[in-house]
Image (cartoon, grey):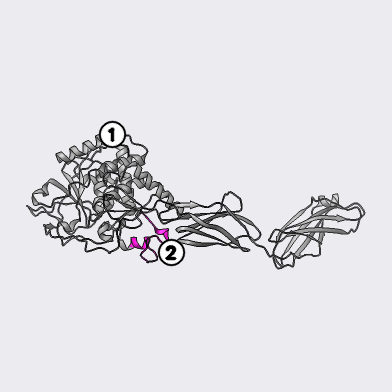
Amino acid sequence: MQISSRMLIRTAIVILGVMLALGLYLSVSATDEASALNTSEWQKVAGYIDSYISGQYNPANDGEAGFTIDAATLKSRLDSNGDNIYLGEGDDAAGAPILVDVLSGYSTWIPATSLRVNWNSTAASTSTVNTIAAKVAAHENAGFSTDIITYCLTGHTESVVAGAYGAISQAGGFGGTTPPAVLGLKWGRYGWGTGSHGYGNTKNITASTVTPGTNSLATNANCTGASPDSELVRCTAAQALSVVGAGPLPWAASSDGSYQPVDLRSSINSTMANQTTGGAYAIQDPLQTLFSSAGGYANLAKINPSGGKVFFTNRTQHTAGIAAVSARMLGYNATFAKWGLPQWNNTIGEKYTGGAGYPVGAYTIDTVAPTITAGPTASAGATSATISRTTSEPATTKVEYGTTSGGPYTTTVNDTVLHANNTVTLNGLTPGVTYYAVVTVCDGQANCTVSSEVSFTTTCTSGKPVLTPLAPSAYWASMADYTNGVLTVDWPIRNDGTDSAYNVQLTSSSANNGVTLASTMPVSVGTIAASGTGTATVKYNIPTGVGSFHVSNMASADDQCGNTYTYP
């Protein structure tokens, strides 16, 4: 990794901020990003934050349900066949997410993790965002989920990364046909594996009586001029992550007055009370509307940007961290409660009670695509074909095929179940046609390999069409035809075969007594189904005085295999 002079300046500023214990946000750059975001930029960032929160919001669990995934659900997406081998043989990778460990310094992690970053230094770097964007594209191409799931040790730092990633996603930073959803793993590694935490506090709670005022909105002194929007949001996210986790509320009574507590629950029966006076002092500001522009950002205006550090809390830490990093991105001096409201008073909120006991370890982060060790080979019938292949590891099988060598391949069949040996069936093919196909194999991390082209020709056993001429009908089609001696004759043809006759044509028609053709040959009849009838309409020039004439016709037709036959 190269270290630029700008990064050195940033590092120096962060160290100085820690040494002086200042409650101020830190600058991402000391050069061209030193002035505040303009109004348009600030509103853009707020808009993407609101799109993420309002788009995924679910009122269950005080609004946390839409932003978390529990360990059992994640396991089912990584181990769909329940054999305790993650994204292995027989697992359906369609639900496989992009799983991001945000504590890269930890010695063990969850199996099938996609990448590891450091939550407050590399999580929102340009390199990391580009890496995740590439994984989103690979997951889409493979037919996998594009959900991004973050995890840490307890759910604390993962929540701020989830909040940052949610806004980046909405701004288009991760690409995708639609912006990827971003979730945090409930309780992090503790929820997945094992852990313990005690809730010993019983600090005062009381009914909420706080009536917040209306304040000016915060300003963010970082990232002005960053473009496009995805870079603007990424820059503010990186700045916010560098400091948002520092200094959670120390839970000491003497420190209560130095924070602005914000309770994110939609309905509050009781909330944190000042330890000295006993009065409720938490602002109620529900998560789902916190960053809405409605009323000139009326909900954000409940918070005073100059009134001390903003301290977000909810039933757990998960959405509190999302709110804190989002507020930081807009310039608020914000933090949040690790472990949530139960850490203040163990009779409210939701407490961690133990993990699922799933394994953690120093697993390999898979970045190597499978190789095709045998095949692909094709075996064709009349209307279907099978494509078989063998790979170096369990992989999905996507077959793209069409009737033109080299493409375009107009039809796709994708089997997202991981198999080392697999056969895919292609249905609905046309008999007697040559098809061309390529096979893409992907492991559970959407590392993919594309095969060379393989071709096959479907078989055809169609019988010869049986065409029978029926009695014709002759008529003058118009007074002009009568005057000019142009006679119209309809020649009915019946298909007495068991299969349809294709491309039926009257190829020639000759007459005696000086009668000549007024129509151009051949005359198309089209397709005649088995036992069906078609008609060829032909005009003839009739010399004056001719009362009758004899006609000899020739016809042709194709069977469904493309073979052409002539009649009689």
Instruction: In this rendered view, identify the residue nearer to me: 457 or 166.
Output: 457
Is-magenta flag for residue 3? no
Give the image location of residue 508, x and y in percent: 82, 55
Sequence-wise, the earlier of marks 1 and 2 is 1
Left or right: 76 as drawn, with respect to 310: right
Question: Callout 1, which amino acid?
Answer: Arg
Give the image location of residue 291, x and y in percent: 28, 47
Start-end of magenta stretch: 73-98
* Residue at which label 2 appears: 90
Q: Which mark is residue 522?
A: none
Q: Is residue 420 above or below residue 35?
A: below
**Who's the residue at 65% across and 61% down the image?**
431
Mark 1 nearby-residue class (10 Å; few <14, some 14–19, many ≥20): few
Mark 2 nearby-residue class (10 Å; few <14, some 14–19, many ≥20): many
**Who's the residue at 68% across and 60% down the image?**
561
Give the image location of residue 315, x and y in percent: 22, 58
Could one spot residue 188 in this view of the protein?
yes
For the residue labelled by badge 2, is the local secondary structure a helix, a strand or a loop?
loop
For the residue labelled by badge 1, is the local secondary structure a helix, a strand or a loop?
helix
Left or right: 9 as drawn, with respect to 405: left
Q: If the image is split into quadrants, where does the N terminus sit?
A: top left
* Residue at which label 1 appears: 6
Residue at the outermost left position: 276
Q: Splitting the image into 4 quarters, where does residue 402 fall?
A: bottom right
Question: Callout 2, which amino acid?
Answer: Gly
Instruction: In this rendered view, identify the residue nearer to me: 528 or 241.
Output: 241
Is-magenta flag for residue 76? yes
How many angstroms separate mark 1 from mark 2 (CA)?
A: 49 Å
